[in-house]
Image (cartoon, helix red, strand yellow):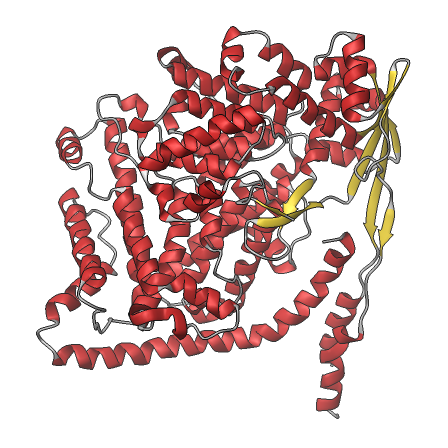
Amino acid sequence: MSYEDRANARPNLNDESDVEEETMANDYREQVNFDDSMSELDRTTSLGGSQTQDIQAQLAAAATPLEYQATLETKFASYDNYCSLFHYILNSEGPVDLEVPSYYWAWDVIDEFIYQFESFCRYRNRIARTGSNEEEAQVLRENPNTWGCYSVLNVLYSLIQRSQINEQLAAIKRGEDPLAVAGEYGSRPLYKMLGYFSIVGLLRVHCLLGDFSLALKTLDDIEMNKKAMFARVMAAHFTTYYYVGFSYMMMRRYADAIRMFSHILVYVSRTKNFQKGGNNYDAIAKKNDQMLALIAICVALHPTRLDDTIHSAVREKYGEQFHRMQRGGPEALPVFEELFRSSCPKFISPTPPDFENPAYNVDPVDHHTAIFMDEVKNTLFNPTIRSYLKLYTTMDLKKLAGFLEVQPEQLRSWLLVNKQRSRQIRWVEGSLLEGDSAISNDLDYALEDDLIHVSETKAGRRLVDWYLRNLARVY
Amino acid sequence: MVAFDKCETRPANIDAILNGLDRYNPETTTVFQDYVVQQCEDRTFDCYANLALLKLYQFNPHLTQPDTVTNVLVKALTVFPSPAFSLCLSLLPAHTQPFPTTQEAQAASQTSDFVESVQKLSRLSTLLESAQYTQFWSTLNSDDLYADLTADVAGFEELVRIRIAVEVGKAFRSITTESLEQWLDLRNREALEKFVTDVCGWKVDGTAVSVPTNKENEARSEVKSERVGVDMFGRVIRRGFEQTA
């Protein structure tokens, strides 16, 4: 995409989202009401049938979070519950006819399933690392296959395959009837929803395991927009954008990461009033802050003009840190690390830890933080370079090195690094992993021996936006 | 258009495995391993396929072949600047601690050859990614272990040299032979001239090397003005008709 297209993309976007804001709010109200009426309906039906009570209890348990203090025994029992439930759904003769407790059930069950997998792996790793609880370590050692990564992935992939959801989504993309390819299972809402949210679940699992490209690949058949099915469930909508944005960030595609985070944060800020009092409001508020922190990191690594709402939210929440990261230099390092640690997913290791060598079980969060911080360190002086070069049209390299109190050789490296990082792969169309190389910086330069020629692509004043806003205010 | 999951030189059978569930099947490990050997020999690179192999190792640690892992990392070094190397590191076990900051982490490299290799290669990656090419060559030549690690990758030094030249070509219109000698580790004038003229197509004039103008080293200033279309005023005009006050 050329600079011109991008410069002009914003006003259009604004216009569109203004219109969509109203529909968004209505949509949201509709969903909430819809959910209410569903749960009432459900209350009456579940009172009626007593034979289905057992399976109903299992369904409800699968979507209910474990207590924070749950014992190891409870965690094992919960795993068994999931196994038998998924076995029943997937391997009965023909599709099962189930009355699910609520509209959100399919999302809740996948979400909770993965959450328990994640927290189990982290717990197991911690026990092995600290050696604090010999008894539990023994139990964990004897059950290496509980919450195994192969069985978790197996569940998700089986749900996807059974429901033919990828084929259905591909058909929708081509403008055909998804029911034609849905098959016996996929045509039922239960399977379709479980299959669909399993795709989002896979995105999350791959990301937790550090496989960021495969995470993005998983969404090949899903279109990222407000009309996508995941947008019907707020938590799913949110989760999807968080993990997609994060994966982009780890692939150093900061422009795409910012686009993803901004999209969902704007959506949240516009529907905020309708979510207050909702049961997962706290969880959403927490993720919201995490994404603001990630946006701050991305913008520091890749200067971009943010949407006004987002920009002021970042400044309000992380003002001081944002400023320090944007300024760069060694003082910014601890800020990058702190924000990254508090906002990254809770990474896990897929295999049982080594109980014999506690030191071997490094926390995967430390691992990924170290990898990310290496890139931050390599690009730490980009802001310094840019702030100086903005002041000149030509500059002698040795003189600038003198200003910065570094060796000319060091400055040459910094100039090369800054130049390299201002070229980035950016999504234009197609699947999430596709993109074009684009110049992402308005400041460019070339060296003629020791003479730096600086050029700047300036955006002319943008009046339309201002004019429209004030016009709206006047009448 | 670049697509991370595609690769022109990828054989059809590998592509089929990558797009199916067989990518999780431990039995395909050998297929991917052979593919890495092939990439090392014919100087191609398929990041997405190599990540699939590292994922198989991640799930089945007992299958891990340290030599193959280091070969994958060395191949990833040859495509800098790119996230390839760090994406590979992300799939390695956390105890390899590629960027050791604590004493314990450094000590870990003394007890395991594999950890030591990963840490050494990560050091090289940092030097390349931060454009410290002179230090890259001196580090590479400072330890025999590096020679062992890169031995399987055909033309490793030349591949890196070409990448460096490409990056230099994007930023410089002309550069002194002295800098280039150090960055490319071509200490002998003849070798440098040959490389610069034959491989890069640049001109040498005394102590200066001039790089022909390309899209990247042009650096032209321009002012982009706003595009104003009638459609942007659609809402205002519509409202004008709706509210006849």
Task: Say which of A203 and A403 sits in front.
Answer: A203
Q: Is residue A169 left or right of residue A194?
A: right
- Vertical position of residue A410 compared to residue A60: above or below: above
Task: Say which of B212 and B176 sits in front.
Answer: B212
- Vertical position of residue A161 compared to residue A186: above or below: above
Residue at (62% x, 49% y) in the render: A435
Q: Residue A92's image quarter? A: bottom left
- Vertical position of residue A451 compared to residue B207: above or below: below
Residue at (16% x, 68% y) in the render: A56
Residue at (83% x, 28% y) in the render: A447
Q: Is residue B221 left or right of residue A255?
A: right
Q: Is residue A209 visible?
A: yes
Instruction: Give the percent coordinates (x, y) of residue A139.
Output: 13, 35
Q: Quadrant of the C terminus of chain A?
A: bottom right
Q: Residue A112's image quarter? A: bottom left
Instruction: Give the percent coordinates (x, y) of residue B150.
Output: 53, 17
Q: Residue A128's image quarter? A: top left
Q: Is residue A35 left or right of residue A90?
A: right
For this orientation, the residue located farthest to the front is: B12
Task: Say which of B162 and B101 sits in front.
Answer: B162
- Please tell me how many numbered marks the rendered image carries: 0
For this orientation, the residue located farthest to the right is: B205
Instruction: Give the percent coordinates (x, y) of residue A350.
Output: 31, 38
